[in-house]
Image: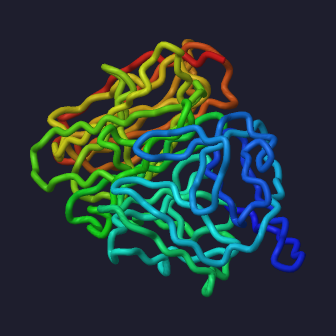
Amino acid sequence: TIIANVTLYTGRRRIQYIQVNRLWNIVSLPVTPIDSLKTNIFPTAISDAYTFEENYNAQDSLREGLGYWLKFDSIHTIGIDGYRLSTDTVDVLEGWNIVGSLSRAVPVGIVSSIPSNIITSEFFSYYRGYQMSDSIYPGKGYWVQVDRPGKLVFSATYYAQTKITKSITPSTFNSLTIADDDGFSQTLYFGKESFDRQYKNKSSLPPKAPMGGFDVRFSSGKWIEIIPDNNGQHREYPIEIQSSSLKITLTWNIRSEDNSKYQIQIKEGEEFLLSNEGKLTLTLEESESRIFKLIIRDSGIPKRFELHQNYPNPFNPVTIINYDLPVASYVTIKVYNVLGNDVVTLVNGVQDAGYKSVQWNAQHIPSGVYLLKIEASSLGNVNEKYNQIRKMVLMR
């Protein structure tokens, strides 16, 4: 959410107020400043001002038309003294550029270029992670990619009516959102070639934030992975996470109905199924890898019954339980304490064949050792039965 900017007019000169967020921001000058020194415009910044030209470069002075990375220790409002900026022409190089803003919001659809049609990406803002933006808002900076050197032309003759950036997302894709304990998050999308193709050529993310700022992306540098429609294939898509937090939350929404098995691998031997909608919180060790793997198997139906070990284990208080059904079955999954007392029933009913997952939130259950038991009976063969018990540890 972008807070509406407040402007105090004094003829053509004004003080324009912009809000900055804790930690990294991409900011710009919404006015032609009276004083261009970074230390005077943004006195509360706790980092250098970084612009981008193939690499990040620290700048002592800021100028209109460009965007800058700046870091702050809290959310607060800053007033910038200068003269109204209603049009601007900005030089851009081939590849990614950070551009600035005007004194009014401008829809990205009216940003033109010289030569024409050189823009090859969406416009990305940074608010606790990268987001596509439908408008250029005063005081914010935006990443944009072009396919050759040229100029971008901004004009506030027409301006955005809304002060809140609309969500622009590929709604037909599966999604995986990764968030840290500082409130930063990034959503990645994935789906078969038969999904919405309008994003196929606009699937790359801008360069990572400087100096360890939060970032999540596929290792390919993309925020969307389009998966070939070849059946019977096993594919892995590494996901790189850059965060200073050790607590990571994964939230997913699987829309696919293509018999694919989607799993996330935290580390070797620790995989869990992504199905329907779900959420999982992980506490990582300093030494643990920040590269997860999205694993996609076009395997259709499992070959055998299987109750997998819950993950994480030990857990506090949420854990994920994966199980496989080779045939349609009546399934019961229960949790017992070590005395054999029934604690909770997680599944009780008929289910189709496939890879399954259930989550247990033991928020109101005391710490201890618990037994997880599955009983499954084939609907088509009364003699085909399966039961398995696994040990779980709830540790607070």
Q: Position of residue 354 (x, y in %)?
A: 25, 45
* 248 lies above or below 269: below
Q: Position of residue 321 (x, y in %)?
A: 42, 32
Depth order, front residue of 78/94:
94
Task: Please give left or right for residue 74 compared with residue 153 in the image.
Answer: right
Q: Position of residue 75 (x, y in %)?
A: 78, 46
For the point 16% across and 38% down, which residue is it? 234
Depth order, front residue of 63/105:
63
Task: Please give left or right for residue 60 compared with residue 6 in the image.
Answer: left
Q: Give the total number of marks visible in the rendering.
A: 0
* 215 lies above or below 277: above
Depth order, front residue of 136/180:
136
From the image, which quarter does the N terminus lie in?
A: bottom right
Is residue 109 visible to the viewer in this orientation of the structure?
yes
For the point 38% across and 63% down, which residue is it? 121
Task: Please give left or right for residue 163 compared with residue 184 in the image.
Answer: right
From the image, which quarter does the C terminus lie in?
A: top right
| Quarter of the image where one finds residue 376 | top left
